[in-house]
Image: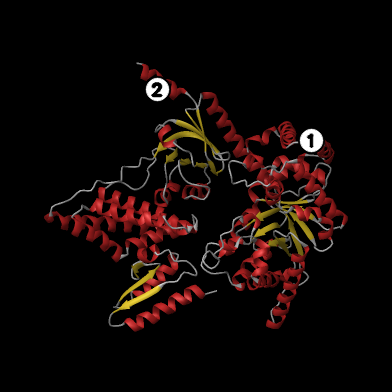
Amino acid sequence: MHARPAALIVKTASKFQSDIHISKDGMQVNAKSILGVMTLAAEFGSEIEVIANGVDETDAISAMEEIIESKFNEE
Amino acid sequence: MENFAIKKSVINNEVILEGIPASPGIITGPCFKYHEISLSPEPRIVTKSKLEFEIKRFRRGVKKTLQFLRKTIPDTSGSYSEQLTEILSLQQAFLEDEIFLKEIEDKIKNEHYDALYAIYAVFQKKKEHFLQQTNEYFRERAFDIQSLKRMLIKNILGKKIEIRLRKPSIVIADILSPSDTVKLHQQSVLGFATSTGGKNSHTAIVARALGVPAVVGLERITDLVQHGRVIALDGSHGRVIINPRKETIIKYQNQQKIHLHLEKELLRESSTVTTTKEGKRILIQANIEFEKELTNVKNVEADGIGLFRTEGIFINRETLPTEDEQFEVYSKIACEIYPQKCVIRTLDIGGDKIMPNLINVHEQNPYLGWRAIRFCLDHRDCFVSQIKAILRANLKGNIQILLPLISSLEEVFQVRELMKEARQILVNEGRSFGDGIQLGIMVELPSVVFLADVFAREVDFFSIGTNDLVQYDLAVDRGNEKVAYLYSHFHPSVIRMIKHTLDAGNSARIPVSMCGEMAGDPLAIPLLLAMGFECISASPAIIPEIKKIIREVDMGECQKLYNKVTELKTTKEVTALLQGFFKEKFRELEVL
C-alpha cells in the first residue's frame, strides 16, 4: 500500500500494546513500522493477514481489520 | 608524450551527447560537477567498548537528517510539485520509524559493525527489496531509500548536504535526489544534465518548476565533462555539447537570446484571435490532462479544451475515483473555460493500469486488447459513473463527450444506451444535470476511417487521434526502437486517411478536429489548413508557435503545398518537402 494508507495502518497499530504483524505472500512485517509495512508492497486487492499477540490482541485485530477494509473499500 | 597528445586532442574535440529532453530552453555556461563522495563504506568491525559510541554516532546522524528534512519540507510545498513534498515526508517517516532504526542499532550491537557500515548494509537491503517490486510505485521508493541513506551517511561524516554553487552553473550529476535539488532554486542554476533519469525524474520535475533547461539520460556525461568547463545545453532537443568550439558557443548564445525573445513575443501575440492571412478563422484548442494545466491554457489563450484526458484522475491511486470526485474536476474545468467548449474523453486506458491487482490480465498484445471503450463497456458501473459525473458537470452546456478507440458502430449504440441509463439514474436521484450533450468519437482506427461516412451519421463530431491512427495504420510500436523509424504522420497513407475522414465529416456536416501529436507539429500545420481543418487541438506549450504559423500563411500557398504532397509517394519525400517549405518561410522559428 502506498505511503498514506501505510502511515494510517502504523498509526492504528501503535495504539495497542500487543505485538502486531502483517503478512503477505509469506513475508511478515511489524505493523508498527512504516518502512516494514511499505516493504510488503501491498496493492489494492492484495490479500494480507494480521497477527496480534498481547493483552489487547482482540481489540487490535478488529481495529486493524476495520482500517484495512475501509482503506481498500473506500470508493 | 604520446599520451599527452592523445589527451589533448580529445579535450579539444567537440563531443555531442544525445539524451532525453526533460525541460526546454538553451543555455551555455560552466558546469558544476556534483561529486558523489564514495558512499559504500567498507565493513568495519569495532571493539565492544566502542559500540556505544557508534550507536550514539548513528543517532546523532538521524537527528541531524531529521532536522534538515523538517526544515526543508515546508519550503517545498507550493513552489514545487506535491510529489516532492510527499517524497521528503516519507523519508522523514522512515527516519522516525523506531523499529527500522532499531534494526540498524542491532546490526551495530550484535554484529559489531561501525555506524556507517550498519546503515549502509540495512539500507542497501531495503533498497534492493524495493527494486525487485513489479509495481512502479514501490520500485521508485528504492531511490528514496538511496537518497536517504546518502543524507544520513553524509551527516555522520559531517559533509554538507546542499550543493553550493559559487557562480551560475549547469549542474552535472549521475542522479539528483529531491533533497539534493530542493535548495537549488535559491541559487543560480543555469540548467541540469544527468546520466540517469527519464522525462518525469526528480531532476526533470525540478528543472521545469525552475524554468531552466535540462537533459537527462546522458550516458557517461559525468565521465566526459570537466568541472568548471563551459558546455552548451539544449533542453528542447535533448543535446549537450562538451568542449564546444568558440563558434558553437556563439551559435548557442544567439539561439538562447532568440529563444527567449521569441517565446516572449509568441506568448504576447498568442492573445490575438487566430486567422490565416486572408482572415480564415482557425480555432486552436488545448489538450490537457490535469486541472492545474488550466493556467497554461489561459496563458496561451486557447479557444477552449479540445481534449481533456481523464486518465490522470484514475491512475496512481488505490481505488477508483467516485462520481463526486470526478464531478468536481469536470465541473471546475467546464466552468473555468466557459463560454468556450471542453471536450472530455472517457477513460482511455487498459484495465491493468487502473486496477493492477484486481485485473490480472496478461495480454499477448495489449494494443489490440482490452482497453479504452472496450474496457469501459465491460465495466458498466465505472463507465456510467463517469458519464453521470460529466452530465452533472454540464450545467452550462459547454461539455462534449469523446469516446476513445471506437472500432464499430455497435459500440456507439451501446454507449448511447448507457447514457440513457445514466440520465434516468440522475433523474431518479433528483440531481440536476445538463442534457443535450454532444457525443463524438476519436477517429484513430483504420476501420472508422473507411466507414467515416457511416459513423458521421451517428455521432455529433469527429476528433482525429493521429498517434494511434499512425500506429494502427503502419503497424508500428513507436516505443520499440527497432521499428520506431517507420512511425510518421507524414506517411502518404496517413495523409489520405485524414483527408478521407475530413471529407466524410464535411459531407455529413459534422465538425472534424484533430487532437493527435500531428496537430502540434509545426510542419503539419499548412497541410492541415489546406485539407480544410478549422479546429485543431494541441498541448498548451506549442500553441503560441502554432498560432504564429497560421497567422503567417495564406490558404493559397497551403493549397499549393498540399497539392504537391498528394503527388508524393513516400514519407521521406513528404517530410523533405514540408521541411523545405518551413525552412524558407519560418527561418526564425527553427530554434524552437
Q: Nearer the viewer, residue B483 or B303?
A: B483
Task: Name the image quarter holding the C terminus of chain B.
Answer: top right
Whether labels 1 and 2 belong to a single chain: the reply is yes
Q: Amino acid at mark 1?
A: Leu
Q: Nearer the viewer, residue B155 or B486?
A: B486
Q: Farthest left residue?
A: B49
- Residue A25 against residue B156 in the figure, above or below: below
Quarter where residue B438 is shown: bottom right
Q: Farthest front residue?
A: B364
In front: label 1 or label 2: 1
> What residue is shown with label 1?
B568
Residue A51 image position (x, y, % from top left): 34, 76
Circle 2 packing at 10 Å, graded few (<14), some (14-19), many (20+), is few
Q: Farthest right residue?
A: B507
- Residue B435 against residue B479 in the figure, above or below: below
Q: Amino acid at mark 2?
A: Lys
Q: The numbered mark 2 sits on a residue in which chain?
A: B
Quarter where residue B424 is shown: bottom right
Q: Is residue B200 visible?
A: yes
